[in-house]
Amino acid sequence: MQGTRNVKEIGEGQEMSSKGAEADLYLEEWFDKKIIRKYRVNKEYRVPELDKKIREFRTVREARLLHDAKRAGVPTPFIYEVDLPNTTIRMEYIEGPTIKNILGETSKELREKLCLQNWAADWKAAQP
Ligand SMILES: Nc1ncnc2c1ncn2[C@@H]1O[C@H](COP(=O)(O)OP(=O)(O)O)[C@@H](O)[C@H]1O
Ligand SMILES: [Mg+2]
């Protein structure tokens, strides 16, 4: 678990760091910061005009959702740039393993403990 990384570090060139359901993600240096460049890719099966609109719409929607979630207290990555013509978002790089990885690699006992802890914290915060 210690060695598990969220995305693959890139060296020279433009090797992809991670592939999402709809986007290619690159871990890059940007103004001296490590950032994620998330590029929403085109889908060949869509009519091109519609494809562009869908990708633009979803790029904007993702930025809004990240922003709204942050305002609601969820620790989401900071957005540095929304590049709409290129359906790209540049955002803060979050280091470390994903919850999915952690849950997949720990014992059943620890998994239960982690989930119950979170549940307890959520429940406590919701009390009047
Ligand atoms: N800001 C980030 N910092 C670090 N890793 C990230 C970041 N955003 C996404 N990732 C990694 O890339 C994966 C795919 O990104 P995701 O946003 O889920 O793409 P998609 O919307 O195409 O499904 C995530 O599961 C996560 O591991
Ligand atoms: Mg995803």
Image (cartoon, rainbow, N blue to C red):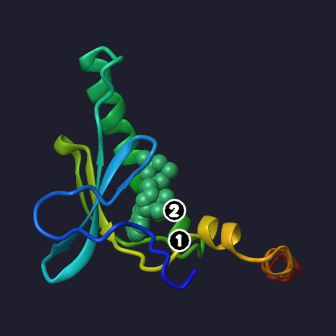
Report the residue at 17% width, 75% height from top: 29
Q: Give neighbour class at mark 1: few <14, some 14-19, many 20+ (Cα, 10 Å).
A: few
SS at mark 2 in the image: helix
Q: Is residue 59 left or right of residue 123?
A: left
As drawn, 2 above or below 86: below
Rendering coords of residue 6 (x, y %): 45, 70
Cα distance in 3D space between marks 2 and 1: 5 Å
Task: Determine which quarter of the picture holds residue 84.
Answer: top left
Please name whichever residue, 128 or 26, is drawn nearer the observer in this view of the structure. 26
Report the residue at 31% width, 24% height from top: 51
Indicate which disc residue 71 carries: 1
Report the residue at 34% width, 18% height from top: 46
Q: Give neighbour class at mark 2: few <14, some 14-19, many 20+ (Cα, 10 Å).
A: few
Q: Residue furthest top?
A: 47
As drawn, 73 above or below 18: below
Indicate which disc residue 68 carries: 2
Please name whichever residue, 70 or 12, is drawn nearer the observer in this view of the structure. 12
Report the residue at 53% width, 85% height from top: 2
Q: Amino acid at mark 1?
A: Arg
Q: Amino acid at mark 2?
A: Asp
Q: Is residue 44 left or right of residue 86?
A: right
Rendering coords of residue 20 (x, y %): 43, 48
Is label 2 in contact with label 1 (beta carbons under 8 Å)? Answer: yes
